[in-house]
Image (tube, rainbow, N blue to C red):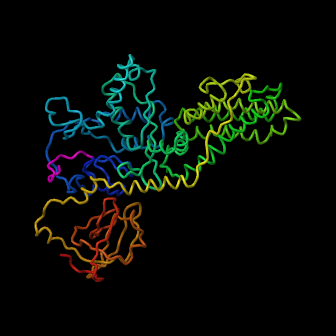
Amino acid sequence: YDEPFQQFLADRYIIGTCPKCGNENAYGDQCEKCGSTLSPEELINPRSALSGEPPIKKVTRHWYLPLNNYQDWLYSWLVEGNGRTETWKKNVLGQCKSWLTDGLHPRAITRDLDWGVKVPVEGGEGKVLYVWMDAPIGYISATKQWAADHGKDWKAYWQSEDTKLVHFIGKDNIVFHCIIFPVLLHAHGGFILPANVPANEFMNLEGEKMSTSRNWAVQVHSYLNNWPGREDVMRYVLASNIPEAKDSEFTWKDFQARNNNELVAILGNFVNRVVVLTHKFFDGKVPALQDGFLQQQYIKEYLGGIDRLSQDVYEPAMEAYRFREALAAAMDVVRLGNKLLTDLEPWKLYKTDPASCASILRLCLETLHPMGRLLQPFLPFTAEKISTLLDIQVSDSIQPLGEGLREGTAIGKPIHLFSPIEDEQIEEEVKALHTAAAATASPEKEIEVKASKASISYEQFAAMDMRTGVILEATKVPKADRLLQLLVDIGHEKRTIVSGIAEHFKPEELIGQHVVVLINLAPRKMKGVESQGMILMAEDADGKLYFLSAANSPLSGLPIS
C-alpha cells in the first residue's frame, strides 16, 4: 500500500532490487533482466513506482489460483508428456522446470484497482482480475467473436483434438503461457492445451534494450514510410537474426549488410541473371530440356542438394520453429543455383552447344519454383514477384525439377528484386533513432523524478550521518553485473561499500572520485560482501547517474548538514 498516494499497489507498481541477479529495477512480479518470477516480498529495498516511498502492508481480501494443487499435473504434462523435452525449446522448458523445482504457490488473481475486468463474485466489489488471469482467456473470447462475425464454430479451434495450439511469445511471458494458462484450461476442462510454446529471447537495438517509452525502437509505420517497397528486407533481417535461443541485436549496419550482401548479391542476382539470359538467348520463353541432361552426375548432385536442403533441413526446422535455420536453408538453395550458373557458364555455350545452354537455363528457371516456395513464409512479396515472373503459384505443389514449367511459356521481363542501400541512408536512420530518443522526455518520467517525497521531521533528517569521502579502490563484485565493491576514505576510517553502479561506471574511472556517503546506514550483505554505507547519487530522467560532492573542498569526512 502506498501511503502518500493512498492506493494499493499491483505487483508491477512495486520496484526494487532482484534477489537473484541484483537488478535494481526489478518489478514485484518479475525481473525483466534475468527472467525470474518474483513476489513483492522478495524484492530488496522495495519502493512504490508512484511515490518512490517504501510500501507498507495493509490488510485486504484477494482470491487465489491454487497453483500448488496442480504441481504434479504440470510436471507430468510439461516434463514427462508428449516428448516435450525433444520438441520444446530448452530455454522454455528450463524456465518451467525451475519454477516447478522451486515449488508452485497459490497466486493472487485479483487486484485492488479501478481499471480492469471486475471480479464477478460476491465480495469482489472494487477489485479487478489480475491481467494474466483474464488476458489468456481473451484469446478464446477473440476467437468466439471472430467466429460469430464469420459464421464459424469457435469450438473447433479450442476444443478439438485435431487443432494444434501454439503460443508465439517472448521469454518474459513463458510463465503465463506454460503455467497459469494451462492450469486454467486443465482445471476448467474441455479445452486443448498448448502443443508448443516456442518463446523467443529478447532482440536489442543498437546496443541497448528496446524501449517504446524511451522511443528506442524502430516503429513499423515509420519504416514503411521511409523504406517503401522494402517490406521483405526487414522481414528477412529479423528472421535471419531472430533471438530463438539467446538474445540478439538489430543494427542498421547489419540491416544494410544483409540487404546488400545477401538479398541483392545472392537472391536478387540469381533471379535477375536467369531471367536476363533467358530473354537474351531464348526470347524470354522457357527453353527445352535436353534428353539425358538430368542424369548427368553434376546435375544429379545439384538436384540431390536441393532435395536435401528442402526435405532434410528446411521442413524439420519449420516444424520445430527454428526459423533462422529454415531461412538459411532456403538461401542455400539460392546459392546452389548461383553456383550452377557460375560453374556451367551457359552464356559461353549458346553458339557451340545451344541445347546444353537451354537445359541449364531451364533447370535454373525450374529452381525458382521451389526456391520461391521455401522463401514465401519469410519473403511473401518477393515470392509473389517470382510467381508473376514464371506465371505460376509458388504455393502450388512442387513438381520434380524439369517437370514444373511448360516449354515455350513466356516469362516476365527482368526485374531487380532488391536494390543496394547506401551508407548515407543508414546514417540517417541511426541519427533519427538517437534524435527521437533524445527528444522523448516522458512527462511521467519527469514528474516521477521531480516529485517531492513525503515530509519528514528535522529529527529524522538529523539522524542521517552524511560525510564527504573519496573512492580509493573499485572492483567488480563476482556474479553481479550491477554491483561494484568500493573502498571509501571517509576521514576517520575507510569503509567497504557495495554500490549498484557497475552498468554506469568502469571501476578504473572511480579511483579518486569525491563522493557523499551515508555512513550510519545499517550494514547489510550483498552477494557475500558487507556494505557499510551508501554512496549518494543524483539520477536524471534518462537514468544517468551523477556523483554528489563538496565542490569547494577535497577533504574527506566533512559532515553534511
- Judging depth in this view, the residue of 410 and 522 nearest the camera is 410
**Residue 313: image x %, image y %?**
62, 36
The number of discs equals 0
- Judging depth in this view, the residue of 45 and 283 nearest the camera is 283
What is the span of residues highlighted in magenta in the rendered image?
A: 1-11
Q: Main secondary structure of the magenta part?
A: loop
Q: Residue furthest right?
A: 352
Does the magenta segment cover residue 65?
no
**Residue 198: image x %, image y %?**
46, 37
**Residue 511: image x %, image y %?**
39, 76
Determine which quarter of the picture holds residue 478: bottom left
Determine which quarter of the picture holds residue 344: top right
Determine which quarter of the picture holds residue 506: bottom left
The relative height of residue 450 versus residue 112 in the rendered view (above or below) is below
The relative height of residue 15 versus residue 100 in the rendered view (above or below) is below
Left or right: where 422 falls relative to 273: left
Left or right: where 193 falls relative to 230: left
Does the magenta segment cover residue 7?
yes
The relative height of residue 40 versus residue 174 in the rendered view (above or below) is below
